[in-house]
Image: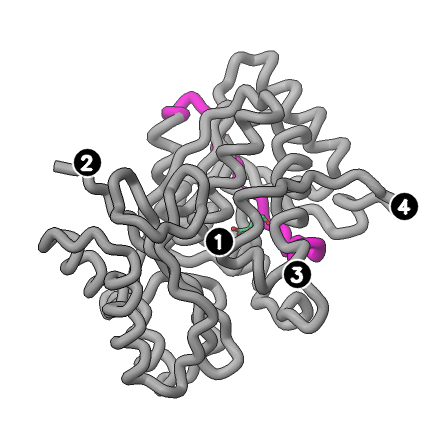
Amino acid sequence: MIMEVIDSVREMQKRCDELHCAGRRIGLVPTMGYLHEGHLSLVRLIRGKVGEDGVVIVSIFVNPTQFGPGEDFEVYPRDFERDRRLCLREGVDLIFHPSAAEMYVPGATVYVSEDRLSRGLCGRSRPGHFRGVLTVVAKLFNIIRPDVAVFGRKDAQQLRLIERMVTDLNYPIEIVAAPIVRESDGLAMSSRNTYLSEHQRRQALCLNRALQAAEEAFAGGERDPVRLKATMASITADVPEVEVEYIEIVDWETLERLSSPIERKALAAMAARVGGTRLIDNTLLDPTAK
Ligand code: PAF
């Protein structure tokens, strides 16, 4: 199959109808472009899910509704030609690359919002962010009707919200959670890492170090979320230029802050600003894991 690029919603719906009628399994990798190794790992994962007879679709759309006022929508890195070449090399079958005008009809008043899992963590400092994410993902699901879609664990709250949306709104779509992909020095891959100077990049490594310290303490039997958070905070405190927004230990199912000992799957999550760049990272703490 020659890689196609479609930028119109109507044409995309028509093409997906044809693919469904032909019995092809469709796998979707939703992205905002400026692809990196983390995205490419999602492409490989979804290819494994749909097989060689299936169709791998990558959507590339910098979604304006998930950026708040004063956030980096205008400067978010974009390079469609580079993304196109990377997709071609990875064997992607189709890129959906709509404009904002194509995705959002003027006067739209219907959105998808969630009112529990989206409250804490990043939702606290980014009001409206997850409404924008859920709305655009729902639109992509409705346009493409994929059999399976993949989301990275780095955006853990986003992943949980999408899992919740699929359950609550009855989307017949399998959601695959992909592992966090890290640079060789441990920094979680993100398109926003391009904003960091070399010095800031080195400072940013304290996020991963803090999470590793929590993992080690947890592996050594520490179950107290307050002490685990203190362990993480002591590491970021050594790097004063890193401005921590939150360090949290939350229940994986509800994303509610834990104050009693961890008894089931929990998430250690953090967000911090390094220079002007907001970075997030996390790790799972699973007391039932062997
Ligand atoms: O994770 C992202 O890149 C975006 O939030 C997503 C899921 C593509 C929605 O715009």
Residue positioned 26% across, 46% down in the render? 262
Q: Position of residue 4 (x, y in %)?
A: 59, 38
Quadrant location, the C terminus: top left
Q: Position of residue 75 (x, y in %)?
A: 63, 72
Residue 54, magenta (yes or no): yes
Of marks 1 and 4, the one in the foreground: 4
Residue at the disc numbered 2 = 288
Front residue (pair 116, 171): 116
Q: Secondary structure at mark 4?
A: loop
Residue positioned 35% across, 53% down in the render? 259
Verify CB contact (< 8 Å) between mark 1 and mark 4.
Answer: no
Residue at the disc numbered 3 = 67
Q: Choose the circle earlier in sequence order: 3 or 1.
A: 3
**Depicted 139 relative to depicted 133: above or below:** above
Verify CB contact (< 8 Å) between mark 3 and mark 1.
Answer: no
Q: Choose the circle earlier in sequence order: 2 or 1.
A: 1
Identify the amino acid type marked 4. Gly
Of marks 3 and 1, the one in the foreground: 3
Q: Is mark 1 within 8 Å of ligand 1?
A: no
Span shown in magenta: 50-67
Q: Choose the circle earlier in sequence order: 2 or 4.
A: 4
Q: Secondary structure at mark 1?
A: helix
Identify the amino acid type marked 2. Thr
Where residue 85 is drawn, which disc sits there?
A: 1
Identify the amino acid type marked 1. Arg
